[in-house]
Amino acid sequence: MSETTLEIKDLHVEIEDNEILKGVNLTIKSGEFHAVMGPNGTGKSTLASAVMGHPSFEITQGSITLNGEDVLEMEVDERARAGLFLAMQYPSEISGVTTSDFLRSSINARREEEDGIPLMQFIKTMDGALDELEIDQNMAQRYLNEGFSGGEKKRNEILQLKMLQPEIAILDEIDSGLDIDALRVVSDSINGVREETGLGCLIITHYQRLLNYITPDFVHVMMQGRIVKSGGPELAKQLEAEGYEWIKEELGIEDETVGQKA
Amino acid sequence: MTVKTQFPYDKEYVTTFSEKNNEPSWMKSLRLRAFDLAHDLNMPEPDKTNIRRWNFTNFELGAEGSTISSLQELPEQLTDFVDQENVPANIQIQQNGTISFSALSEDLKEKGVIFTDIFTAMQEHSDIVEKYFMTDGVSIDEHRLTALHAAYLNGGVFVYVPKGVKVEEPIQAIFWQEDNTSALFNHVLIVAEKDSELTFVENYVSHNTEEETVSNVVAEVFAHDDAKVSYGSVDNFAAGTTSYINRRGVADERATIDWALGQMNDGNTVSENVTHLVGQFSVTNARSVTAGRGKQSQNFTSVTHHHGKDSDGQILQRGVLRDKTTSIFNAIGKIEHGATRANAEQESRVLMLSGDARGDANPILLIDEDDVTAGHAASVGRVDEFQMYYLQSRGITKDEAERLIILGFLEPVVNELPIASIQKQLRTLIERKIY
Ligand SMILES: Nc1ncnc2c1ncn2[C@@H]1O[C@H](COP(=O)(O)OP(=O)(O)OP(=O)(O)O)[C@@H](O)[C@H]1O
Ligand SMILES: [Mg+2]
C-alpha cells in the first residue's frame, strides 16, 4: 500500500453557530495509530464527523487534506472512496436494506460499474469476515443495524472496516458496548487489518483497556475543542491511573468542555 | 334537478354484449339494472381527493385480443410479468378482456379447483357466480362506478377452491389492456371454501401514455371458515388510464385474507381495499405500496371493518412521491359494536422526494365497542439525511444511497408479495418510476 497522509490543520467547526472545534492540528500517516482521549463533550466525535463530512457541521476555518487533496471539497462518498473510513459512535439504522446488500453496494462503489464483485466471491469474503468477528451469519440478512444490540452495531462497523480496507480509519468509541470477549475479537481484527494493509488509524476511546489490545503510537488529549496534550502510549496509562484533573491544573483549564471559552 | 349523464355506450350495446357472451339471464338483467342505476347514482367521493374533473367517460369498448399457444410466445411487453425460471403452472393471460392463454394444473383440476375467465364461469358455474358476484362484497348500487362496472363488465377471472383444498402453486392472472383506447371493466371473483388455501397474484398492464381511457376494476374475495387467501397485485396502468380500483374481502371465522398490493399506475387512481372481518378470529394484513410520479393524483383507502369478535386487522401503507404528484393515504379501522377484543392497527408512511409533491397520511379509527385494542402511526417525511450520510460514508454514491433507502422503505410491503419473480418485477417498476 502506498504511503497515505491525512493532515488536519487549524480546524474550526461550528454547529448551529456554536464553535465546537477551536483549532485542531493532527497528522495521521499510513501505519500510524493515534489514540484520542478526553472527557465527555470535548469535541472528539465532532472531529471524526468533520473529517467524514457529517451534514450538521460547518467548517469555518482550517483545512483537511488527504495526500495533499482537499478533503473539504469532497462529498462524503468521495471521501470514502478516497480512502477514509469512520466507525461511528452511533451508526444509523436503515430499515429494509440488508447488511449484505449494503456491504455489496459499498464494495461495488469502489469498482467500475461493469466490474461488480462476483456474488460468490463476495459471499466468501463476507462469511470469512463474519467468522473472524464471531458475528452470527444471520446478521448479514438482517436490516442494517435495525434492532442490533450496542455490541452488534460496533462489530458491524468493524466488519465494514475489514471488508472495505480503507487507508485511514477513525474509530469512534468502538469499545463502548462490547463485552470483554468481544473487545478482544474486535481488537484482533483491527490489528489484523493494521498488519495486512498498513492502515493508519485514529482511535477515540475513554479506556486504556482497548489500548492494551491495540497499542497506539501516539496519544492525544482533547479539551475545549483542541488537542491540549500529546504523548506516547504511557500518557494513556497515566490518564487511566490519574484522570484528567492534573492536565487541567497544568494548563489552567477549569471547564474542559467546549461550552466555555478558553 | 340532475342532468342526465351520457355514457359512451348505450343499453343496446350492453344487451348485445351480454347476449354475445351467452350470459345467463340473471347477469343480463343485473347489467341492465346497473346501467339504469349508473344514471341516477353519484360518483364516489374519496376523502380528500377531488375527482370531479377526472376522465371517467372518455373511452372505447370492444377491442379484441389474440391467443398464444404457449408461454414461449409471450409478447415482449409481458415477459417481465411471467417467471421465466419457474414457469407458472396456473396462469391466465387476458388481452383486452379475452383469453390469450390459460393453464391450470391437472392436479388442481382433479381436486375441483376452478380457474376460468369470468364469462365462462357465468355459463358453466352460474349458480356459484350468481351467489357471490356483486352481492355480499361489492354491490352495484354503491355509486356510479360500481354500477358502470357491472353494466360494462368485459374481463376478469373466477377462482374457486373447494373445501379443504390447499393450492400450493400460486394462481396468476395477467390482464393486459393492449389496445390503447379500450377501457377495462375487470372483475376478479375468488371463493375459498372452508379450510382451503390459495395464493393469487394479478397484474394489470397497459401502454397508453397519451391516449385517454378508463379502468374500472373490482375484486371480491370470500374466505370461508378457516380459509387462507394471500392476494398479491401489481397494477401498472399507463399514464393515460384513469383507474377506479376496488378490492374487497369478506373473512369468516378464523379466516385470513392477506393483501400485498403494488399500486404502480401512472395515471390518476382511486383505489380502495376493504376487508370485512365478519367471523370470530378473522384476520387481515392489508399492505400496499405506491410510487407516484409526474402529475398523477392518487387516493388510497384501506379499511379493516371489524364485525367479528377477536378479529385482527393490520393496515400498512407505504408511498414514495416524486415530481408534482399528489397522494392521499387513508387507513381506516372500523370496529362495530359487539366486536369485542378486536384489534385494529394502521400504519401509513410517506416519503417525499420532491418539494412539489403532496402527500397526506390519515389513519382513522371508528370504534363502536369498548373492549378493543387499536393503534395507529403515520408520517410524511423526507429521506433521512443521517441515513444518507451513513451510506455515503461507505463510498456509496448519493443516488445509490437514496435508491437503497427508498427501496428499503418500501420493502416491508414488497417483501410480502407472494411470488419472488413478482417481487423482483415490482422492485424494477419502482426503480423505473423513481428514477
Ligand atoms: N448535533 C449537535 N447539536 C448540538 N450540539 C452538538 C451536536 N453535536 C455535538 N454537539 C455538542 O458539541 C460538543 C462536543 O460533542 P462531541 O460529540 O464532539 O463530544 P465528544 O468529545 O465526542 O463526547 P463523548 O465522549 O461524550 O462522546 C458537545 O457539547 C455537544 O453537545
Ligand atoms: Mg463522542
Image (cartoon, helix red, strand yellow):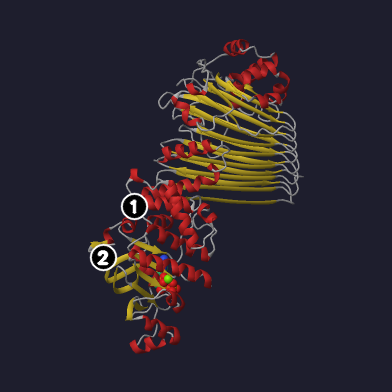
Which amino acid, mark 1? Arg
Count residues near mark 2 (Cα–Cα under 10 Å), then give few for <14, some for 14-19, many for 20+. few
Between marks 2 and 1 in the image, the one whose residue lies nearer the viewer: 2
Residue pointed to by mark 2 = A3
Q: Looking at the image, is B106 positioned above or below residue B383?
A: above
Label 2: element kind: loop
Is A109 above or below relative to A131?
above
Mark 2 in CB contact with mark 1 (< 8 angstroms): no
Quarter of the rendering occupied by the C terminus of chain B? top left
- Do pointers 2 and 1 mark residues of a single chain? yes
Quadrant for the N terminus of chain B in the image: top right
Q: Residue B209, how many percent across, how many down? A: 41, 27
**Which label is found at residue A110?**
1
* Position of residue B270 measured from the top left corner of the image (x, y, whole percent): 54, 34
For this rendering, which residue is in front, A194 or B394? Answer: A194
Residue labelled 2 has its Cβ within 8 Å of some atom of ligand 1: no
Tell me which image quadrant ligand 2 sits in.
bottom left
Identify the subunit bearing mark 1: A
Instruction: Tell me which numbered mark, 2 or 1, is placed earlier along the sequence.
Output: 2
